[in-house]
Image (cartoon, rainbow, N blue to C red):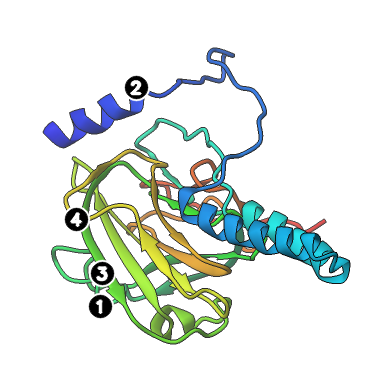
Amino acid sequence: NIAALAVEGATMTKQELTNRGTGVAKWSFPPVHPEGRKFGLIAAAVTAIFAFMAWETLAWPMAGITIWTLAFFRDPARATPIDDRFIVSPADGLVTLIEKVLPPPELAGPAGLGDQPMTRVSIFMSVFDVHVNRTPIRGTIKRVAYIAGKFLNADLDKASEENERQHFLVERPDGVRIGFTQIAGLVARRIIAFVKEGDVVAAGQRVGLIRFGSRVDVYLPHGTAPRIIKGQRCIAGETILAEIGVDQDLRAIAH
């Protein structure tokens, strides 16, 4: 399969890490995504003007805004498990909803996720979370559908149907399909895709970004239960949301 070979080749060009201690891992300041550098520069320029004019009451708050802007667009490296059984989280944030729903019309049908109810996991990203989103599995981008809409609180259930959103459908070489959706929130005003239909992606690869507070929904295949629970925090590209074909309920205690 050409798509499978392309993804595997792309994966192997990266530094490989294992649980036996191989590979090199070290801490560093996360880089700022190019999409956010212009905002950081604008904020820094305004701060410099205020400081030059000796307007300290404005310069200090603006300096804080500059730091926050750069932090918002941070794009840290992630270590994604290389295992086709796993569905990894596409977003950093809090799991706020896990429920059975029909797939959205843009992802439904025989060439999509079908027409039967499936488990949807909703991950809410606050303005303090990393907002670069990643693909949950490796495969080919079969569908990218942008829908204009409202800007309701992304934590609300109806945000999945009413807010501005962007749907992705990814298909593995063996035919398994995963759908996930970027949803704008109260403050978010732009959803950006880094990939297009026909692109081949590796699990955990960056696929898009949402500006300023939002949510990502993931639709799990039939017969697959989430391995995370409501109230848990996820890390994009690292947290394992589910194991394909494993339908086992989990329980947890909040401490």
Q: Amino acid at mark 3?
A: Ala
Q: Residue 123, position in %: x, y?
A: 54, 63
Q: Amino acid at mark 4?
A: Glu
Q: Earlier in the sequence, mark 4 or mark 1?
A: 1
Q: Amino acid at mark 1?
A: Pro
Tell me the residue that label 3 is attached to. Answer: 145
Mark-to-mark CA distance, 2 and 3? 30 Å
Mark-to-mark CA distance, 4 and 1? 17 Å
| Visible residue check, residue 229 | no
Q: Earlier in the sequence, mark 4 or mark 3?
A: 3
Tell me the residue that label 4 is attached to. Answer: 197
Element class at badge 1: loop
Cβ atoms at labels 4 and 1 below 8 Å apart? no
Element class at badge 3: strand
Tell me the quarter of the picture where residue 92 sits: bottom right
Tell me the residue that label 1 is attached to. Answer: 105
Q: Is residue 179 above or below residue 149?
A: above
60 sits left or right of 91 in the view: right
Q: Earlier in the sequence, mark 1 or mark 2?
A: 2
Tell me the quarter of the picture where residue 31 sits: top right
- Residue drawn at x 35%, y 22% as measured from the top left: 13
Mark-to-mark CA distance, 3 and 1? 10 Å
Q: Residue 229, position in %: x, y?
A: 60, 58
Q: Residue 18, position in %: x, y?
A: 52, 19
